[in-house]
Image (spheres, coloured by chain):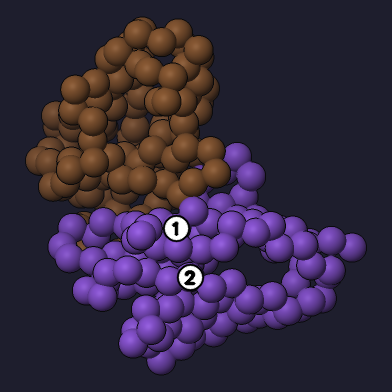
Amino acid sequence: EAGVAQSPRYKIIEKRQSVAFWCNPISGHATLYWYQQILGQGPKLLIQFQNNGVVDDSQLPKDRFSAERLKGVDSTLKIQPAKLEDSAVYLCASSLNRGHETQYFGPGTRLLVL
Amino acid sequence: RKEVEQDPGPFNVPEGATVAFNCTYSNSASQSFFWYRQDCRKEPKLLMSVYSSGNEDGRFTAQLNRASQYISLLIRDSKLSDSATYLCVVTGGGGNKLTFGTGTQLKVEL
């Protein structure tokens, strides 16, 4: 079974530029999560989707971050404009549903903002 | 106070040693508890769930003390391949939101 796919794997941009990350969850998984992991910290949930609806985006900096999952499968996370403190690994995860099932993580996108 | 607190380590132990990690959480309404493992520059992967009755998986034993809001992970007979960061994770409320600790780094040496 294919795992969670993410692209790109690495991205270097300058501050104030825009960037977008893509995630394809495990087939059949209704719930999709985006996490931000800053070096030396644990992952922090940014946004959670159930199919194409947002369940929790309380920790998403909405002035610069946006995310969508239009058809309830793939998802895109965008940062516009980027700041230095956005340098982190952006992890996508998926689970069968929003109950307490296991979340499976993708390899992440490593973002460096200069 | 952080929602989930762990000693960041690193814990440097010789191969074959027994090592224990502790974790405390602040939300008494937390419902589910896990240990995840994260290798360097890799994604987190579920190591084991933690139940009130305690659970064991081979060399790994996890325990939960709800009264003290405390979770532990014990690794017996450490292997070089156990070197990783161990993340304590709790969930609470609806939505399956995971709250991660900062992780404890383990280095197993020859």
Residue picked out by circle 1: B101
Task: Check the image and report above or below for B2 versus A40.
Answer: below
Say which mark, if any, is on residue B23: 2
Work out whether mark 1 precedes mark 2 in sequence or the reverse, and give the earlier one.
2
Left or right side of A2 for A20: left
Seen at 35% across and 16% down, the residue is A82
Residue contact between numbered discs 1 and 2, judged by CB atoms under 8 Å? yes
* Letter of the chain that mark 2 sits on in the rendering: B
**View extreme (right): residue:** B110
- In the rendered image of the structure, the colour used to display chain A is brown
Where disc 1 sits, the SS reads loop
Q: Which residue is nearer to you in this view: A101 or B28?
A: B28
Q: Residues within 10 Å of mark 1 (few under 14, many from 20)?
A: many
Evaluate whether label 1 is on the same chain as label 2: yes
Residue B106 percent coordinates (x, y)? 68, 60
Amino acid type at image mark 2: Cys
Instruction: Spot the purple chain and give its letter.
Output: B
Q: Percent position (x, y) of residue B34?
A: 42, 69
